[in-house]
Image (cartoon, helix red, strand yellow):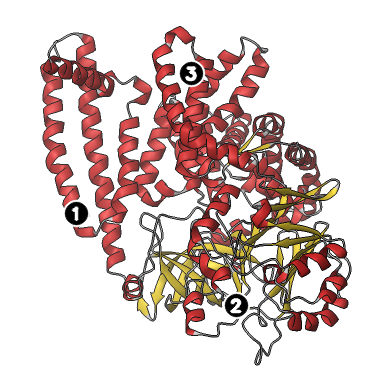
Amino acid sequence: MTVTEVLCRVGKGAWQLTDPGRIPGPYRLVPVALVVWGLSLGLPRLGSHILFLTTGIILAIGIPLSGASILAYRRRYRDSRGSEVRALVRAAVVVALTLVAAVGTTNIALARARVEADPLLSIIQAAPSLDEAEPPLLGYRAAPARAPTVSMRVRATERARPIVAALDGSERMILAARTVSVRGAPSDVAVLLVGARLDALRIGDTVDVDGSVRESAPGTAEVAWVSVRALPRVGTPGPGGPAQMIQRAVDGLREGLVQAASVLPGSAGTLLPGLAIGETRTLPVDLDQAMRDTGLTHLVAVSGANCAVVIAVCAGLAALMGAGRRIRIVAGAIGLGGFVLLVGPDPSVLRAAVMAAVVLGFLLHGRPGAGVPLLNIAVIVLLLLEPGLATDFGFILSVAATAGLIMLSTPLAVALSRWLPTWLSYALAIPAAAQLACGPILILLRPEISLTAIPANLLAEPAAPLATLMGLIVCIAHAIWPPLGLVAVWFAWLPTAWIIAVARVCAAVPGGLVPWLPGPVGALGLLALTLVLLGYVLHRAHRIRWGVAILVTGSLLTGSAVIPAVLARAGTPTGWIIAACDVGQGDAILVRSRGRVALVDSGRDPAALTQCLDRLGIDRINLFVLTHYDADHSGGIAALGDRIDAALIATPRTEQDKRVRAQLPSSARLARDGDTGALGGLSWRVFWPPSVTSGLSANGSAVVWGFEGEGTRALFLADLGAETQSLLIPALAKTSYARSTDVVKVAHHGSADQDPELYRALHPRIGVISVGAANTYGHPRTQTLSFLSALGVRILRTDQSGTVFIVRTGRGLEVRTER
């Protein structure tokens, strides 16, 4: 066989695999959906002129291909039935691809042209380059100090969502909006506001804000991220049209449910609004974390299940009133529309609503729709209308979970029924299908695998529809007569309390979270493992021996990169509260509580800090404390990039200090004695420097930061010398830190410049010394180690033990080390 013959056969086989005419019926729209998604990912990065040119190229190629496909179908009309059908499908797919590609590209080009003509983009482009990269996982990046400050008027288009706590402990939020004017010039582009107290704004409210502006990453829905510096001034509402009246009524319903649910005991009153309408503002941090750890957060992300409940109830009520099939369908559609207004335009809601609307449309014409085509139609429609959804993790997870349920739940149930009762097989297959489909994507957000997710969903899912239904009833009842809502809410307490109990019990299971390699490599590794697992479970080995062999080979190749890193992370304790990174001669110490993370200093080497953060799966620094500007404390800041949400810093004294300061967010504030705030369940405080720092050296004016909470008290002494340490003793003697500090970060890497009286006043149990091996300074000094040992302090050194972890267990504080 010649090389030419081999290539011909390979080409023929490849065509048979990709030939639209041979694609099974339910999957014929998949290529169209993939093309639209690809266009939505890539094209927004281009300029409008290139986009219009691309549209012309698509039409120039697509129209002749469409014509050729139609002619081919007509020529084969008299051929065999199979040939005719394949030709028809080929023609339909080519025409559909041409149309959606042209429409999608034109839509993106028009939107980009509007953005390019907007004054806001001109202001941003005139500012210094900010070295943009890929979109961040949380959906925004704080603007750095050199970003321009802009006064603008904006109109809220969504409800504010909480993200992280600000320095004073208040909730920071993000709010999607559209500009009305920028510096007095008319403007109309999407922006994302980042700041505190944005939850006071309702959809449609117009506000004037002053904020530092940063151009968003290419491909995101918004043009800019605005870090709000001045509190928004809400515009005086006018008489309002029908849209505003409807929005006020919707907000009243939402607030009524929150108010009625507040009478329930425990955390049930905070979870019920989330289950019913996706309102999670009041959800406690510990319950939110428990639901994340057990894979139950989808219950408070309104999606298809909620829409199905609403449609079923509305259609059922219409049926009880004697309505016919068409009236029942219309009643379901009206209920669906009202529900979407009530919960807001979240990505999962939009996906579910479009799918449900298409289903209702098919039913109205007497043709039930199948799951895969409906999902493809929903994806195509939504991405054509809003290309920014292509990079929205909420939308991606919603599509993946739905695809998993449609394609995997039944085969998994059939496979599991070999060993389990049928009812249990189907009950397990549903959460398993969703988890398997979403797992690789979730690794990009959080590099951990929850072993309790499937059993937690199995136990919680039956209660979710009942809680959703009762929550909606409470919503309506409270609007009709508030006392009726206060009575009805108690019927929702039991299913809600059950879900809370399941989340907290499953989250407390030891070893429930397995560390995994972060990033794309980790996602690909889990995807390969998932495919191999599905292959073995769903098919007999001899039927897929070649497929399994290929997948196993791919998994082994991926595993060569994945497994060593996973094993390294597997040795990392999951319950740490303090982690002193081994970054050589320098400080970089992490503090974690309830999913919030603080970092005290950054060490000298960005690569060493990056390695520590990646190993621990840290992608956000909610609070960065820069004690002073020496290179061994600030040199690693370049590794943090856009991970920082808020910063507490020492006063810059030199031009070099100011250059370091410029790398941090513009919202960073100078630390002073008495500053306080919250980090998860911890309360933190600044003990030094005083408001007047004249006469103090750089080390003498360094920031001393400490925290207490969750049964732990710790103090970080930066590089303070003995003279400054002595000044701290009177202030600390009046606090709870006196003689009851659990952990102290020994000052200046254990140098000899120490005041033993300060450590005697603190009486710490554990002393952490962050120091480099074989450093030229002789740190830590023998006399420092001697007096600490005499005080009964357990000394932990990063040069000897590697990264040091302080872990809170049922037995109290325990120490784990890297080596």
- Looking at the rendered image, the disc whose residue lies closer to the viewer, 3 or 1, is 3
**Vertical relation: 15 (above or below) 252:** above
Give the quadrant of residue 61: top left
Whether residue 737 is visible to the viewer of this picture, yes or no, is no
- Precedes in sequence: disc 1 or disc 2: 1
**Residue 535, labelled with which disc?**
3
| 627 lies left or right of 331 | right
Q: Amino acid at mark 2?
A: Arg
User: Which residue is at a point 39% across and 52% down the rendered structure image?
Assistant: 388
Give the quadrant of residue 132: bottom left
| 196 lies left or right of 765 | left
Q: Secondary structure at mark 3?
A: helix
Q: Which residue is disc 1 drawn over?
A: 52
Question: Disc 3, disc 1: CB below 8 Å?
Answer: no
Location of residue 311 in the rendering, given as x and y in whole percent from the top left corner:
56, 36
- Precedes in sequence: disc 3 or disc 2: 3
Q: Nearer the viewer, residue 386 or 313?
A: 386
**Vertical relation: 457 (above or below) 385:** above
**Residue 669, labelled with which disc?**
2
Location of residue 616 in the rendering, given as x and y in whole percent from the top left corner:
60, 49
Q: CA distance from mark 3 to mark 1?
A: 44 Å
Question: Disc 1, disc 2: CB below 8 Å?
Answer: no
Q: CA distance from mark 1 to mark 2?
A: 46 Å
Q: CA distance from mark 3 to mark 2?
A: 55 Å
Q: Nearer the viewer, residue 671 or 74?
A: 671
